[in-house]
Amino acid sequence: MERSMAPQSLVLTGENYQNWSACIKNYLIAHDMWDTVEANTEPPNPHEADVEFKAWRKKNAAALHAILISCSSEILSQIREIDSAKLCWDTLADKHKPQPQNEDEDDKDKGSL
């Protein structure tokens, strides 16, 4: 039985970022692609380590594909030119991950009631 490479998950619409990112992260982990997204290092130099670079490029493309096909058309139009799975993931997190509220702002809001 052949496994599908397309993630069967939520479509990122913006407001569902937390649920979407959890599903996609688990999919990428299960398919051994999460390290490409999580990596804090530069990709291998294509001239110095051809085999290593080709392996990285294949993993990056698969992870990027999984991310792109799980985004709404509106969100896809904002990220479709990105060619790095890590940069794509980080861009989506910057745009859609809910930010914790500042406790000082909460106190100001409570005081103004």
Image: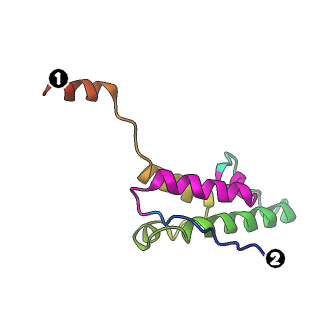
Secondary structure of residue under mark 2 = loop
Left-right relation of 102 to 26: left
Q: Which residues are magenta?
A: 13-37
In primary-sequence order, the first of circles 2 and 1 is: 2
Label 2: how many Cα within 10 Å (few below 14, some 14–19, many 20+) = few
Indicate the position of residue 63 as horizontal and vertical percent values.
66, 63
Is there any visible trace of residue 91 in the rendered image?
Answer: no
| Majority secondary structure in the magenta region | helix
- Name the residue located 55 percent from the left edge and 69 percent from the top edge: 68
Q: Looking at the picture, does residue 89 appear above or below residue 3? A: above
Left-right relation of 51 to 92: right
- Name the residue located 39 percent from the left edge and 36 percent from the top edge: 100
Left-right relation of 2 to 92: right
Secondary structure of residue under mark 1 = helix
**Quadrant hosting residue 30:** bottom right
- Image mark for residue 111: 1
Indicate the position of residue 61 as horizontal and vertical percent values.
68, 68
Label 1: how many Cα within 10 Å (few below 14, some 14–19, many 20+) = few
- Image mark for residue 69: none
Between 60 and 66, the one lying in front of the other is: 66
Label 1 amino acid? Gly
User: Farthest residue toward the bottom?
Assistant: 1
Q: Is residue 84 magenta?
A: no
Q: Looking at the picture, does residue 12 appear above or below residue 26? A: below
Indicate the position of residue 111 as horizontal and vertical percent values.
17, 23
Mark 2, residue position:
1
**Quadrant hosting residue 50:** bottom right
Left-right relation of 100 to 113: right
- Name the residue located 46 percent from the left edge and 54 percent from the top edge: 17
Indicate the position of residue 76 as horizontal and vertical percent values.
47, 70
